[in-house]
Amino acid sequence: MAPQTTTTDPYLQVKDLRVSFPTEDGVVRAVDGVSFSVARGRTLGIVGESGSGKSVTSLSIMGLHNRKRTKVEGQILLGGEDLLALNDEQVRRRRGRDMAMIFQDPLSALHPFYTVGHQIVEAYRVHHKVSKAQAKKRAIEILDRVGIPKPDKRFDQYAHEFSGGMRQRAMIAMSLINDPDLLIADEPTTALDVTVQAQILDLLEDLQREFNSAIIIITHDLGVVSQVADEVLVMYAGRVAEFGTAEQVLRGPQHPYTWGLLSSVPSLHGNAEEDLLPIKGNPPSLINVPPGCPFNPRCRYAMLDPGPCDTEVPQLLPLALSNEPGHTVACHLPERQRKETYENDIASVGVAR
Amino acid sequence: MLRFAVRRVLLAVLTLFAISVAAFSLFFLGPADPAATMCGSKLCDPATHARITHDLGLDQPAINQYAAYMRGVFVGRTIGSGETAIDCPAPCLGVSFRTREPVTQILARAFPVTISIVLGAAVVYLVVGVGLGMLSAIRRGSFIDRTAVGFSLSFASMQIYFLGLLLAYLLVWKTGLLPRPQYISPTESITGWMGGMLLPWITLGLINSAIYARLARAQMLETLSEDFIRTARAKGLPIKRVYLKHAFRAAVTPLVTIAGLDLGTQLGGVVITETTFTMQGAGRTAVLAVFQQNLPIIMATVLLAAVIIVMMNVIVDMLYAVIDPRVRLS
């Protein structure tokens, strides 16, 4: 595949995505007006706590949400085509071929009763009219490519006979066998040993260079983001809190929630316990999102009585004072105050230092 | 795999030995007096009573009686002495205290009836029950699902004799849609056998369908929420393939265990079904024997039921090792 060097639109463009599902207790607004784009060869990290809408976003892109119970609005342009305007069958044909996904726990994501090889061959043959022997040859090639030793033997083994890291490699092989242009990795390293995590991330970066695909990595691990992401999208309560390049967001974070995430990661320098500054409380219920800025009940710097943090939803706006093109943040705090607070309170704790 | 099989079979033999000892002790060391039964209860004179007791070997120590019984099972034996002696070839399970007919012959008559009922009904409930359950899980919340759940509830709360007699009245006596329920040996007439069996099959089949529909539905719902189903969809597989291949395979596996064990229990005798349709199967034979204190028949039915259940357990274990690759390692 020839890399697209022309300055066309990014391969994936998500525009004002809104995902909600009615429940007995009320309407859950899992994603509420999220926009972003990922170009081929680029990696977007989506960061947020559980329930921030990051997984729902990726499942909506893949069309894996329950169509009957979920209302999805906005646009998801994949190679210029709006996935939300297609029917089930049309989306299915793109799934696995143009866009693929790998999941958090590779043991439960692989079928326990079919061999790994069988499952990979199946993934290939859905989209390619080839014989079983040809598909097997291709599957063994890709198993070899993702760094699985003795791929011809491994082909006939079951998921439970693989180690955690090898399993995730097999999942990656399965998702890449059709050479998709978009790969979504939903917490791909969370279930793995720390020592294996870095290997898997290296592999993903490696394969991205080779296949020139657009990658979305969903994670709550800022270490993962700093290692692989080009751009970072921080999500909170189904909305974008902050967006920018990895450098911008990790080195000069603007949103108090991003500060919270950074200072919740223990640092290897100094006193790890004193440095930690966890975010108090829990993410809000997505049925009952707090008015104004959804983060205001947990924000140490919230401007309340009188507002605007609990009355007015902050817009995602570019920075006005610093010269950081592309860096946007949804926060009412004045930019100057944010800068000072960050330098005084945050930059000295946790991993931020 | 071979070691696995050998170990399971050895364990099964041990289990059967224990059951035979337990059953033997219970029945032969119990308070019942089979000699009195045989010689005609109260009218029996003490001399005849003593002779019969001796003939049956009941004056022997229990261990010798057990040995004689087991020898009979494997090589056959002669029961009694003189002109009342009965030759009982292997596998000898004793003779009926009432009719002096070898128990083996009685069982050879009764078990085909039970097997006919149980296997036919199993086809009904495995197809109807499991099919309905899986369908309603796939179409969760739909009209089909609600109908299936309603069906399960109503049939699960019905009794075999109620449903059986109701169906017999409606389908046989009132409309003549089905032939009269009766057991005709399949060696005699295969169509006659099927015709006579239809009603018991439908009755037992429907009632078990209700249970299997609920099991299958729950199992399928659980499977559908598994990560590997999401993976299968993420690969772009057509939804039918996801359901029929990935989900079905995973959901049906636990049902194999339940069905195998159920089948084992039922083959030991389905008393209520047999009684409802007045068919002389193993269950009814056993119950009658209990009322008549006909110990050899009780002993034989208990033992045979145990053999069947233990065998089904072994079969289920081995089958499981074949269908679930994760079991093979252990």
Image: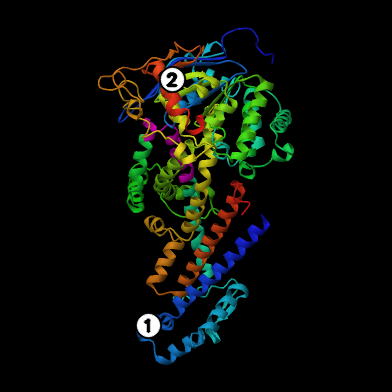
The numbered dot on residue B41 is 1
B99 versus B192 height, above or below: below
Q: Which colour scheme is used?
A: rainbow
Whether the magenta-drawn stretch holds residue B126 is answered as yes
Name the residue nearer the viewer: B146 or B124. Answer: B146
Residue B190 position (above or below residue A176): below
Q: Where is residue B194 in the image (x, y as percent from the top left)?
A: 49, 48
* Main secondary structure of the magenta stretch: helix
Q: In the figure, residue A199 lies in which quadrant?
A: top right
Q: Do the residues labelled 2 and 1 touch (CB within 8 Å)?
A: no
Q: Mark 1, residues whose alpha carbon is within 10 Å: few (<14), some, or many (≥20)?
A: few
Residue shown at 39% from the left, 45% from the top: B210
Q: Which mark is residue A339?
A: 2
Can residue A239 be spotted in the picture?
no
Q: Is residue A79 left or right of residue B38?
A: right
Magenta span has A87? no
Going by the numbered disc 2, the residue's amino acid type is: Lys
**Subunit bearing disc 2:** A
Q: Kindly indicate the quadrant of the structure image that contains residue B271.
A: bottom left
Q: What element carries label 2?
A: helix
Where does the image place residue B22, in percent across and percent down from the top left? 48, 74
Is residue A293 something that shows in the picture? yes
Cα separation, mark 2 vs mark 1, equals 106 Å
Where, quadrant-wise, is the N terminus of chain A in this rendering?
Answer: top right
